[in-house]
Amino acid sequence: MKYRVLAGMVMAVISGQAAAQTWVLTDAEAGTDKGNWQIDSKQLNASGQPFSIQQKVLHGGKQEGSKVLTITSEQGLTIALSPTRGMDLLQVNGHGVRLGWDSPVDEVVNPAYINLESRNGLGWLDGFNEMMVRCGYEWTGHPVTKDGRIYTLHGKAGNTPASKVEVTVDDKAPHEIRIRGLLKEHTFKKSNLETWTELRYIPGADAFTLHDVLTNKGDYPQDYQIIYHSNFGTPILEKDARFIAPLKSVSPFNDYAQKGLDNWNVYGAPQKDFDEMVFNLVPKADANGKTLAAVINSKGDKGASIEFDTHQLPMLTMWKNTDTLKQGYVTGIEPGTSYAYPVTIEKEQGRVKQLQPGQSTTFELTYTLLKDANAVSKAEQRVQQIQGEDKVSVEQKPIAKE
Amino acid sequence: MKYRVLAGMVMAVISGQAAAQTWVLTDAEAGTDKGNWQIDSKQLNASGQPFSIQQKVLHGGKQEGSKVLTITSEQGLTIALSPTRGMDLLQVNGHGVRLGWDSPVDEVVNPAYINLESRNGLGWLDGFNEMMVRCGYEWTGHPVTKDGRIYTLHGKAGNTPASKVEVTVDDKAPHEIRIRGLLKEHTFKKSNLETWTELRYIPGADAFTLHDVLTNKGDYPQDYQIIYHSNFGTPILEKDARFIAPLKSVSPFNDYAQKGLDNWNVYGAPQKDFDEMVFNLVPKADANGKTLAAVINSKGDKGASIEFDTHQLPMLTMWKNTDTLKQGYVTGIEPGTSYAYPVTIEKEQGRVKQLQPGQSTTFELTYTLLKDANAVSKAEQRVQQIQGEDKVSVEQKPIAKE
Amino acid sequence: MKYRVLAGMVMAVISGQAAAQTWVLTDAEAGTDKGNWQIDSKQLNASGQPFSIQQKVLHGGKQEGSKVLTITSEQGLTIALSPTRGMDLLQVNGHGVRLGWDSPVDEVVNPAYINLESRNGLGWLDGFNEMMVRCGYEWTGHPVTKDGRIYTLHGKAGNTPASKVEVTVDDKAPHEIRIRGLLKEHTFKKSNLETWTELRYIPGADAFTLHDVLTNKGDYPQDYQIIYHSNFGTPILEKDARFIAPLKSVSPFNDYAQKGLDNWNVYGAPQKDFDEMVFNLVPKADANGKTLAAVINSKGDKGASIEFDTHQLPMLTMWKNTDTLKQGYVTGIEPGTSYAYPVTIEKEQGRVKQLQPGQSTTFELTYTLLKDANAVSKAEQRVQQIQGEDKVSVEQKPIAKE
């Protein structure tokens, strides 16, 4: 049961499980925002793993006014996300390992300074530096112009300031933290989509879960697409780092990727002119539709895994961008409803989903920082277990041409 | 006589009629803004109908930094407008009746987050939820691309933050309130238009007046267009609500509207797939050029009327958007210099006006909340009086094709 | 030797020459900005010419949030620049002379409110009113669409908020003031350019120097262009004002300029329908590559000169926009790496430069306010000295067609 929480107030929310406190940091309905804000486990008299949660308003350059919300768990993870940038995850750190990457874009760019239509629909690249950016929901994929209209690269969600932001902490140990953010894609006559993003984290843990609920608030069926564009660079990505996932098939995104098909799942060192190879994967899942994908370093003692549900996210894209360090040495693990082709192609090939009026759909993904050989090994075992004896079908030809 | 008012200062302004106090809330020339601000009749020792005037800076989502200025008159109207959005009127409430509508766009979107050129010139729809938005002045109407340039839907004024905002209250009863806002459409070599918008309201009244003065500050003749896009939903709009106005003629905007010509002035209940029908009207006026248009509910005991001057605003558009409640159940009464065709068509057909260097032109409209059967009846009588015995000519064919 | 300066802290910076204090006003890395801020020579116990330095955050209209940083030297110059607008120089005043001009754009427009792609790539005109705006660096010149992408008028630098802003004042007389601002043009896969702009001014002086260092932070060669678009109106510009510079040649930018070739370097009074004539100049320099260009009033007792280095800036554009006062009566003196043709033409004709990975290049220009006949005379002598006996070659035909 959930009460309407007044902006700036703290209320006990009684759920089925446990009592919890909720802080409303942003509430567009009330027109309020807390700005710089902080709580920590000491203030809350919370036992167990110490933690703090902080919101900071940034200044300078194109990040003027951007907010960053950070969970810090000294023995677990430090998770930074940006409410101004669609609740995107900026970076996650723990045990000396960083989930994330180094983009030439080194500010948390306020969408007010981004024109998504610039460079013929590539404006998204002016802000792209996240560990995880939601690509959707009205559309996603490479840009395309149809009937004079540009469908911009990877849609608008990642550049949409959250309309509501709530932080909830369970009263009882292990004091689960939940950060919820509401993204609205509301355009008169065009879209009435809302997404409640939620990040769930237990202080001290090496994993966190995203639990996002997308709803069509409109009276008409609405197409949607979503790709969880999750990006990892050093120290996990390195020469001979590997991508692992139980798979039915792999195919190259385009002719250039076809050239890299032989060792598509092994990464090279930073390489000039490598640019990017993209591989379209069909994940294999367990009986419940659950699967995972991971990138692990060469020694097999560091990595990142993403567990997801193939009923929710049936496609998986692997983005191999092992270009130079300054250009962006990064790989993307991208569970989605679609591949990264333009929406026109995705639609044509039947991968664009639809929500009926009032209908909701949920996406749940668990990100784990694989901190040592043991953690990596467990992820590998899980992959093998799901893969079983079945071979991965390697398709030589791209399924579409842009 | 008007003195230069210093930002943040209060000065007595002596006009021909009455002494008054003026508060400068925003002054771009001085670089200042009062932010959150409030006065009320008590503070001012103003007798008669109590009132308050409040400016609030909003936060959250895409309304970050948007300002809303609200006049509250408990026995009259509550009028909310947004200086950040071109002094647009957001909502007017009184006597249990709301002038305005429910758009899927439910935030007061800061234009910093709007790209008017997006969706091939439909970016305006990302912010559209006003009771009245000025569509102009450099151009208005449906978008069109000419010589590679997009003339975006309904121009820029409604998404232009006001450069000056002043609140004036007469010292003497009935303490007329005047809210003035300066909109600049200044682009080197392209436009040098300025509009002083003014809203005049007497506490306790059921009507308010807009008195806008558009000036060509440049040394060259300048084309302009303006449509007062005034929008009404529930509770006035409902099944069998009616549009009334003295008219010379009505014609359908396009083939789809032609299908609805038979009962164009009667509204249906919210209807899926209705989308919008638009009707081009030629208003009939009294000897002084004055006329009015109104929408009234089925019982005839609630409504909204707009009085205007056909010398200033010779065209009238009726926008019938009786789609579902969530999609936007709304009708527009839109006095203007133009119809809603693209500027290219309006120009071709001779409806685009021009201001000579230094020339000003005034638009004055009075909006009345028709609170009961008596008020509605008066409006109907006025319509009939102006209509007289003359029939409305019903043209079957649209005058233009987009 | 330079220490990492913490945001908000003041540290002594020991350079080869002198000890100095530095104030970090903006630091995107730390996420901080000082907002309104001021120092003056009294506070610093600085002897000699009194001065003050002030940062102010502006409000109102489209300048909401724009910052202006002003050096005031009562017996020298008052120099106003905007960190929000690419460290552009807004105006310089001294000795009753103003360097700058009156644009119809009369606000310091926050780039958040500008869409550079609007009007088919002319959005830059919505903010153009500076005495000096850097046109670059990823591209510059007139807009052009290539492969569906718009290269917008004069690039992005002038509409890029500075990521770092530092004010340094030498401890010892004459207390040189240095204002440094960092501009980032960072787009994933597209650009990794950084420019440290620096303005150097000695209180009491009639001149200041720009010392800008552009660096390609990426791993790939990067094309760049820069034009120092420096603009002067009244009181220097007037009927019979003259443009002077040692030159090898002059050619008209287009057919219209060809008509004005005969007296291209003499200005007329404000003239309706004059619009603009542009002349492409090849500057002549001294043995070290140094040269200058100036505009001087008709009497020869007021003017503005720009000294620059033809090794850095081999091209010079003269923009004669002697249209009416309200339309913009202004001339541009524009040293650059390019002329103002679209980047496609500049590239084709070999004027687009390139930086190798990690490579930097410096641009140094000295602007002098010529306050009296003596100062003007010195500038004229210097021009004559460099010109020597060589004639200026007058080319009749434009070198390119847009």
Image (cartoon, coloured by chain):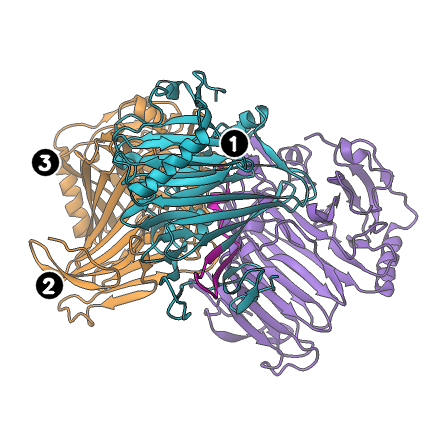
Chain colours: A orange, B cyan, C purple
Q: Residue at x 69, y 57 (%)?
A: C364
Q: Secondary structure at mark 1?
A: loop
Return the residue nearer the eye: C311 or C240.
C240
* Residue type, mark 1 in image: Ser
Q: Is residue C47 magenta?
A: no
Q: Chain of mark 1?
A: B
Q: Amino acid at mark 3?
A: Asn
Marks 3,1: beta carbons within 8 A: no
Q: Is any atom of residue A138 visible in this view?
A: no
**Residue indicated by mark 1:** B338
Between C138 and B144, the one nearer to me in the picture: B144
Q: CA distance from mark 3 to mark 1?
A: 61 Å
- B198 relative to A33 in the view: left or right: right
Q: In the rendered image, which quarter contains the C terminus of chain A? A: top left
Question: Which residue does the numbered mark 2 point to in the structure image?
Answer: A173
Residue type beneath disc 2? Ala
Horizontal placement of B140 versus B132: left or right? right
Q: Secondary structure at mark 3?
A: loop
Please state the chain letter of the residue tagged with numbered disc 3 in the rendered image: A
